[in-house]
Image (cartoon, helix red, strand yellow):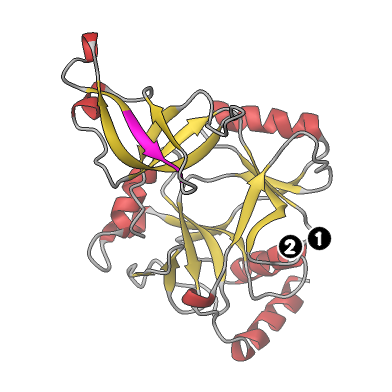
Amino acid sequence: MVRRICAVLLFWGGLLAPLAADAFEPLLPQVYDESREVSGWLMSEKLDGVRGYWDGARLWSKQGHLLQPPALFTSGWPTFPLEGELWGGRGTFAATAATLQRAPGDSGWLQLQFAIFDAPAVPGPFRSRLAAIEAWFAAHPAPHAFVIPQRPVAGRAELLAELKRIEADGGEGLIVRDPAASYAGGRRPEILKVKSALDGEALVVGHLPGSGRLAGMLGALLVELADGTRFKIGTGFSDAERRHPPPPGATITFRYYGHYPSGIPKFLVFVRIRADQGL
């Protein structure tokens, strides 16, 4: 089976033109809710990295910026497109983003890996695309790439138990995917992110002063969502961050738990500046 898939991929290598980064619309997850039945779907850890797109010859960011890793980093990768996360391990998001923005060929790349989860140009359902990627890398081991392990979901209880285990180990959450789904760009119901808390992004539009112990420091950020909704975030900051808060114009990530009827997120906690916002 592996030999047959590899032969097909070698044949595709001469027929499939790389997908242009500026014409590529990535597949994005929706948020899981408990009414969804996902038994028989495939689950994997949601890695907190920087999204990357390999067009078969070059590596791009989600925003379409050409990345410039050293040649050793992409050694052994196929001539067909791949999607994945540029990842340095749990809790290393800021360091990973900083590495990607350094001079071309920076040796820091060699501390990262490309954690692969899809092959957009391979026809067929997700299970077939996954098999094609696994077959390629079984035949062509690459030191800085791996296929993210997937395993079937037996039911909701197993899904939540695995989520609890991943979060206890410092992971971000899970991704579950319909193995029969074809690839289609945009935010799709066939791929879901599963987390105890949700993450959002907002633009910093102002600083609100602190009082009492926080006098002379940041009390809260005034932020704005893409739809124009404004609200304050006052928790999650270290004293150092309150002394030197994210500037107006910066994009931040925040954590929340549900929404008020007004649409404003509940129980807000600052997480970080989006260090990869320029990527």
Q: Which residue is mark 2?
A: 126
**What is the number of the mark on residue 180?**
1
Judge by depth and name the residue closer to the eye, 149 or 224: 224
In the rendered image, the vertical position of residue 258 relative to residue 93, given as above or below: above
Mark drawn on residue 188: none
Task: Using the image as rendered, state which of residue 236 and residue 171 is in the foreground.
Answer: 236
Give the SS element for disc 1.
loop
Residue 41 % position (x, y): 78, 48
Residue at x 54%, y 73% (from the top left corner)? 24
- Magenta span covers which residues? 221-225
Q: Where in the figure is residue 84, as x and y percent of width and height?
A: 53, 59
Residue 114: percent from left, percent from top: 48, 59
Residue at the extreme left:
216
Say which residue appears at 42% left-offset and 42% top-offset.
Answer: 202
Which circle's residue, 1 or 2, is located before the other in the chain? 2
Instruction: Please state which of residues 10 and 224 is positioned toward the viewer in this rendering.
Output: 224
Question: Is 61 situated left or right of 23 in this image?
Answer: left
Is residue 223 shown in magenta? yes
Residue type at tag 1: Ala
Q: Residues within 10 Å of mark 2 (few under 14, many from 20)?
A: many
Residue appearing at x 54%, y 82% in the figure = 18
Location of residue 215 by image quarter: top left
Whether residue 132 is visible: yes
Which class describes the residues within 10 Å of circle 1: few (<14), some (14-19), or many (20+)?
A: few
Q: Which amino acid is tagged 2?
A: Phe
| Horizontal relation, residue 239 to residue 146: left or right | left
Residue drawn at (66%, 80%) of the image: 9
Mark-to-mark CA distance, 1 and 2 = 6 Å
Q: Are marks 1 and 2 in contact (CB under 8 Å)?
A: yes
Q: Visible in this render: residue 74?
A: no
